[in-house]
Amino acid sequence: MYLISDKRTVPRSITLVWVLFNLASSLCFSQELSQPIHQVIEELDVKVHMRDGIRLSTNIYRPDTTGKFPVLLMRSPYGNGGEGDKEGHFYARRGYVVLIQDTRGRYESEGVFDAMQAEALDGYDTQQWIGKQAWCNGKIGTFGGSYLGFTQWMPAPLGSPYLKTMFPTKTFSDFYKDAYLGGAFRLLRWSPWSYAMSRPYNVDDSFMQNITDSAYRMIPFIEQDILLGWRIPFLRDWLAHPQKDPYWERSSVGDDYTKIKTSIYNLGGWFDSFQQGTLDNFMRMTSPDIDPEIRARQKLIMGPWVHASESRKAGDVDFGEDAALNTSELKLRWFDSQLKGIDNGIMQEPPVRIFVMGENVWRDENEWPLARTDYQEYFFHSQGNANTLGGDGTLNTNAPKNEIPDTFVYDPENPVITPGRDEPIDQREVEARKDVLVYSTGLLKENLEVTGPVKVVLYASSSAINTDFTAKLVDVYPDGRAIRLCEGIIRASFRNPEAPPSAIRPNKIYKYHISLWSTSNLFKAGHQLRVEISSSNFPRFDRNLNTGIFPALDSTFVKATQIIYHSKEYPSCIILPVIE
C-alpha cells in the first residue's frame, strides 16, 4: 500500500519510519527547552527616553543573577503588566530579560496616543536603548499579537543591530490594508477598538455596550464620536482618508521589507480579523527579492482560530483537540533556537504549517500559496430567482450560457447584518433575506479541498453611481448548517486598484474582483459548497449610502437596484484554490 506526498510515491513502511523518527526527534528536542531555574528581579516603571524627549514606561523582568542575557521585548497600548506579570516571569525564569512597555500616550507613558503613528521610531529607539544595557547580550527578540505585532513590524526595517528575531501573532504591517478592504471601512474591527482606546476613565462598560450600535449607525459616519461624547481624532483621520495616500505611510512597512534582516515566526488564524495581514507578511518576507539567507528563516503557522484564541472551538464549530495550540511553548522553542542557539529542531521543520478544516488535521507545506494549487472556476447559475436560500441559484464548474440575471434591492437603511464577529457562524438567518443571492452546489460526491486565496469575479450593474458588492464562501453541512469560511467586499468606486476611485454609470455592467482572503477547508462528501452575494455586511463594513458622496460625510440614503449577471458574455464565478 502506498501514500502520496508531493506527487511522489512513498512506501507506507518508509513513511512510518519517517513519522517515528520525527516523533522521537520531537521528544528529544522537547527536553531542550529552557528550564525555569531562575528567581526574578522586577524593575517597574523604568522611563526610557525617545529621541524627542518623551519617556515611555517600561517594566523589566530579569533573572536574579549576574551576567548578560537575550532580551524579549513587547510594546503594548493595553498596559505593561505590573508586579508578578505572568509572561514576564515565565521567560525571565528561563534565562531571558523581558521588557514590557506602554506605547506612547498610554497608561504611564508620556506623550499623545495617535494610534499606529509613532511605533516605528519609538520601537527602534527602545531597541537601541536595550542593546546598551549591562544585562543585554546584544540579542533582542520581539513578541506579541494584534497591535503588539504591529509594533514589531514597524521598526524592523530601521535595522537595529540588536534585533535578531520576531514572533508576531495575528497582526499586520500595512494598516491601510487592514483598515479598508476593497475600499470599504472595516467598521466592526476598528470603530469599537477606537471607542475603547479613547474613552475617558469615568465611562463604564455598560455605557459602551448601550451606545455602540447607535454609534455604528451614526450619519454622517465621521461624527460617530459626537454620539459617544468625546472626540477621537485618529478615527476621524482614518475616515477622512479612504484612499491609500501619504497619510498612511507612517503606519506601513511599504517597500522596505528587503531591509528586514531577522528571522520571523508568523502565527495566524483562518478566522482572525488580521488573517490576510499575517499571510501577506510571510509572503512578502519569502518573495524573490528577499536575501535567500533571510528568506530561509521565515515560518508560518495558520490554525482554525479567531483573533483572541488558539483553542479547538470557534463559533459554531469544534475542530477537535488537535486544533488547540500551546503558544507559550512554541514561542519558547523559537526564542531558544534564535537567541540561545539551542538546536531544538524547529529550524529543520518545513516553513509552513496549516490546519485543514473539515479534515481537522495539521499539514506541513513548503510555501504559501501552495505551488500545486489548481485554481478552478465555479460558475453562478439561476433562472433569475437566486434570492434567498429557497431560490433557484446553483453553483458548478459548467460555464453559463444564456441565463436570466438575478436582481435585488439594496437598502442602506436595512443592511444585511453580520452574524457574530469573525467566527464561523451559521448563515441561514442571513440567507433568508431577499437581498441575499444564494448559489449552491449539489451534495458533493467526493471530498473537495480548498486551500489558498479565494476570489469572486462578479459581473454586475447598479442603478446607483456608487455602491458595494459583498461575497461569502460557505460550507453547508448535512444538517443544514451554513458555516461561513471567508468573505470580502468591493466598493464600486474602487473597482480598479490601479486608478483613483471613480463613480460608475448607472445600469452599466462592470466586472468586479472581490478578494475573500484565504482559507483551508475540506468540503466533505455530502456537504455543499455555497456562495452568498449581496451589497452589505454590516457592521463588519460601513454602509455605502449609494449617493457617490464622500462616504464619511454622506447623510442621504438611496436604494439601489442591483443586477448580477451569469451568462456566456458575463460569467460570474468564484475561483477556488483546489488541492488534489
Image (cartoon, rainbow, N blue to C red):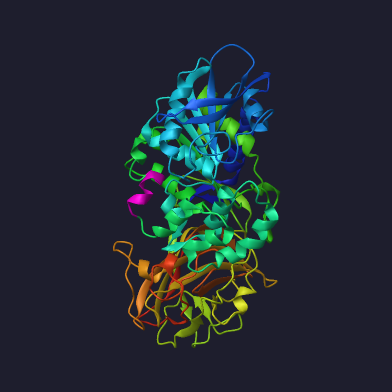
Q: Which residue is drawn at 64% across and 57% down?
A: 208
Q: Does the magenta stretch include residue 249?
A: yes
Q: Indicate left or right for 232 with 512 as reference.
A: right
Reply yes or no: does residue 415 show up in magenta: no
Residue sitting at 46 percent across and 74 percent down? 545
Residue at 58% over, 42% down? 15
Up-down: is 280 above or below 217?
above
Q: Quadrant of residue 327?
A: top right
Quarter where residue 514 is shown: bottom left
Helix, strand or loop for the magenta stretch, by majority: helix
Q: How many marks?
A: 0
Decide which of 359, 78 is in the foreground and name it: 78
Vertical comparison of 91 with 441: above or below: above
Q: In the shown orientation, is residue 7 left or right of residue 256? A: right
The x and y percentages for residue 406 are: 47, 84
Residue sitting nearer the eye, 231 or 57? 231
Q: Is residue 528 visible?
A: yes
- Relative horizontal placement of residue 568, taking residue 178 as reference (left or right): left
Vertical side of 574 occupied by 400: above or below: below
Residue 199 in picture, x, y percent from top left: 59, 50
The magenta span reads 245-253
Q: Where is residue 355 in the image (x, y as percent from the top left)?
A: 58, 51
Residue 347 position in % (x across, y down)? 50, 33
Residue that protrudes farthest toward the top in the picture: 66
Whether residue 345 is visible, yes or no, is no
